[in-house]
Image (spheres, rainbow, N blue to C red):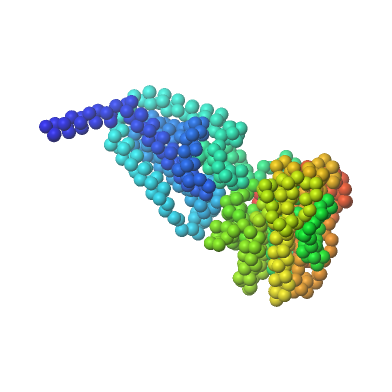
Amino acid sequence: MILDILKKAKRKLIILTENPVFCVVMLLLMSIGVGLVSLLLGATGTWAAITSYSLVVKYLLSPTLALLNLLPPILMILLVYSISGRAWIAFSFPAMLIILLSIVGLYKVQMRGDPLVATDFAYIREAGNILALYTLTIYGRIVFAIAALALGVLTSVFLVRYRPRNIKIRAVSAAFIVVVSVFLYAFVYVDTELYEDVAVEFWGTNVSQVRKFAARGFMYPFIHSIKDVSSKDISPHEKPDWYDEQEAIRAFESYISYDIPNDKKTNIICIALESYSDFSALDMLDYEIDVFAPLYKLQEESFSGTLITNTINGGTINTERLFLTGNTRLTNYRTETNSYVHYLKGQGYHAEGLHTGEDWFYDRRLINRLLGFDEYYFLEDYSDSNRSDSFFFSALLDLYMMRDKNKPYFSFNLSFQNHGEYDSRQTVEPYCIAQGGMSDEAFNVLNNYLLGIYDTTLHMQGLIDSLRDDPDPVVVVVFGDHMPWLGANGFVFKELGVNINRDTEEGFYNYYSTPYFIWANDEAKDMLSNDFIGDGGGLSPCFLMGEVFRLCSWEGEPYMQALRELKVGVDIINPPTGLFRENGILTSELSQESRAKYLELRMMEYFRLSNYIAR
């Protein structure tokens, strides 16, 4: 009797597995499963503040986003089913392709800090070389994905057995799926407005390409990126209408690239300080503590001036990367990019640095590697790390002391301590300033900010003092990355009556000014025959490294020489406002001579961005 029951059940199962409706439903469910596995793998590589499972739930709670990620495996599997007429073929090959892409995407994020996009396949050889440098970790979710794939293949072989034999129906079905797919790609998947609107929210999606990508799943943003392949120029830098490559090459050839003489190779430590600004210059506060006295002492024994940044409150990478590259404006980075870091490495320098923030923030781990750093350290790289400047200055000094002294040393470091927001509810004694007529909220914000700045300044002074008697030559470059915003809508500025209207000259300088100084110990002064003392005036971040080279009597590469020539007449280039400063006067229109030099420099800049020169 049991045998008869089993035989009947087997016959029913065979009938069911050969039922066309059952088979299509099963393929649909299995396709959705492939899409879910892809989403899970994509979410695994985000370093999100939430678990990848929670992120997948967020995807599914957004119907549009879920559909955009699940439709590709559904359409691919149904298309192959229509063409082949065999469920196991229909499932196996599309599923393997999608899961393989998802795994590659996961590893690319983990190893390079960069999402997988379609243009990456143009660099498949470079990817193979990079892969050889890493040991792959087999994550549990990858094992799960492979197991799910194997289960799906077995299911498609034994439980989805219907084979449509009508060639005309299969051809029509395949054609219909192709038309639908082409339509969806042309009018939905490449739609930029939709792409910007459809995204889940989690912390950091506005400061990391990885998280911007992950906020939209995996298959959807990957397919969206295919549009970039259609251009012959897959460079991330959009070619300007005015660009003439032959003119750019001619400009480069008019200069000679110089090496740094071996007897002039001093160590260099660069420090960008978060939201560091000299508020005493505003001359409207009564100080209880001389917050900036240590800064003034250092400036007196340095070459110092005012950095006119392109940003306020946020956008540290704008100042940071313009300093490291000499570029006049911020751009994207996907491949090796010409920079002063690469130039110095070509001169035998070892390049490293430290940031007391997470490595994914602004994609720094990836991009600092593309800019040429041998090593770069973040909070994740220390077991006892924190965001304080006490840790920051101690750690960067340790890096300097532990360097290989057989090589000249270049270090670029970025602090985090004074990153806003600043508490408006309370502050602590001793107060840096008298409250005067300020509201409690404004006083708390400003006093908390200045307490952090004072602490930073003391630690900076301590670092410099520890380098004074260093037997090796060292030059230290310090600058603020941008002004702080000081409360919602900058209300502290308003209470103080500080003009930050960029349409006025006073407001422009108040909005963008931070201090910088270039200091050298006695060994460096003797080596370079320069006292490193003087007034550097105001300048844009793109010019600051050129001042370092000039003080060191280094000529540098052609682009830097062109920058220095332009700076003789034009020392401020401010893309947000479209303003320049020519011969000490702010203007939106350069003279004919300066405009010609500026255009030539911009051509060189674009060529240098788009053509990496291995050193």
Using the rendered view, name the quadrant where residue 233 is placed. top right
143 with respect to 195 (left or right) = left
Residue 116 position, x and y percent, is 53, 45
Q: In which quadrant of the rendered image does the C terminus lie?
A: bottom right
**Residue occupying image coordinates x 64% and y 53%:** 337
- Looking at the image, the residue that sits furthest to the bottom is 471
Asked whether 330 or 594 is in front, the reply is: 330
Q: Looking at the picture, how far across and down is residue 283, in whole percent? A: 84, 52
Q: Residue at x 42, y 28 (%)?
A: 174
Measured as percent of width and height from the top left, residue 17 is found at 28, 30
Please state the total of marks drawn on the protein image. Answer: 0
Eyeballing the image, is 496 above or below 396? above
Is residue 511 left or right of 215 when viewed as pictured?
right
Q: Is residue 533 above or below residue 577?
A: below
Residue displayed at 49% across by 27% down: 179
**Residue 73 in view:** yes
Identify which residue is drawn at 65% across, 63% down. 390
Q: Quadrant of residue 507?
A: top right
Q: Residue furthest left?
A: 1
Q: Is residue 296 left or right of residue 48?
A: right
Residue 262 showing in the rendered view: no
Q: Nearer the viewer, residue 520 or 117?
A: 520
Quadrant including the N terminus: top left
Q: Position of residue 527 (x, y in %)?
A: 76, 73
